Amino acid sequence: MCEELEYAELLDRAADTEDPYERMAIMAAFVISGYSSTYYRAGSKPFNPLLGETYECVREDKGMCFIAEQVSHHPPISACHADSNKFTFLQDVRWKNKFWGKSMEILPIGTVNVMLPGFGDHYEWNKVTTCVHNILSGRRWIEHYGEITIRNTKSSACICKLTFVKGNYWSSTVNEVQGFVMDQEGKVVRRLFGKWHEGLYCGVPPSARCIWKAMGSMPTDYELYYGFTRFAIELNELCPEMQDLLPPTDARFRPDQRHLEEGNVEMAASEKQRIEDLQRTRRKWQEENGIKHEPRFFKKVVDANQRERWVTNNTYWELRKSPGFINMENPNLW
């Protein structure tokens, strides 16, 4: 989830943009940019988060603090919250999978939210379907398709509609995105087009202007390192000065993940099995003793539309500061 903030500077730009139509177009660029890191990921399956697993990211260069937690196991739900001086970003992620023989569809459920306090804006949008093709043989590739509607729930000035075009690997429309910003009278005030792994443009070719462009080069040997972008590689760094600040539930401490990063595939597989067995044993003990898991840093709420959502309980950063996680009792996940 933190990878979706690789281009968080777009939110800073939106927060500094007075025109509501242009602000919405920049928000559209941010929404699309969140898919760009998946382009080289078709060959790799991520680790399943453990119940209670957390992850923090403090990026002074982006002026941003991020926290995520796996709040539910059945169904699997991950919640996150990010703050900066200019924006707040939050979502809880849940999904359904569909297998179609040679491909697998991932259908996300729920919405993503961004607040820009400078304008009192609250943007909300859905996610599109993701499909991994050729999962059994051949060259795997990822496709995103469907429609996204971005609304500002605090203003009716405009909405944005984006279409992630469904194509095929050799099609000229592969990864194509089309869209528009429409005012409250239904008039199109911005036309948008581009590709989710390359960039987004506003206007009509050839005079269209670029709103967002993906980072150019990938890291050296990126194919050996699971298709990670430079930003993704940085996310798992564990500096000595961080060790006493992070809770032991932070994903950086996962031994299976760490072994895999170091190239020890056999040890990673062994540790993964041990950790998953430990989780099953822990869950069985809780069920037998009538103990219900309670997330530490997020709480479930019902919003104005009667939808269940997970939001921060605003305790993580305070506990990190005092008494500090190293001085607290913490669950042993691995």
Image (cartoon, rainbow, N blue to C red):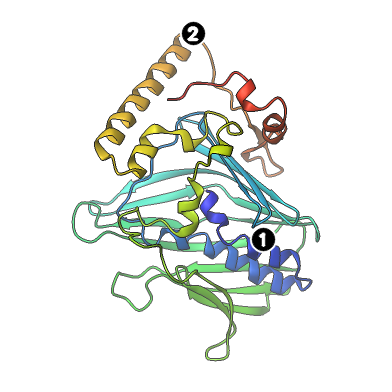
Asked if residue 183 shows in the view, the reply is no
Residue drawn at (36%, 62%) of the image: 220
Above or below for 81 versus 326: below
Report the front residue among 194 and 186. Answer: 194
Q: Which mark is residue 289?
A: 2
Q: Which residue is mark 1?
A: 151
- Image quadrant for the C terminus? top left
Q: Which mark is residue 96?
A: none
Report the mark closest to the observer, 2 or 1: 2
Q: Position of residue 108 (x, y in %)?
A: 47, 49
- Under tag 1, what secondary structure? strand
Q: First in sequence, mark 2 or 1: give its number.
A: 1
Above or below for 67 versus 169: above
Q: Amino acid at mark 1?
A: Arg
- Under tag 2, what secondary structure? loop
Taking 36 as reference, is 247 left or right?
right
Q: Amino acid at mark 2?
A: Asn
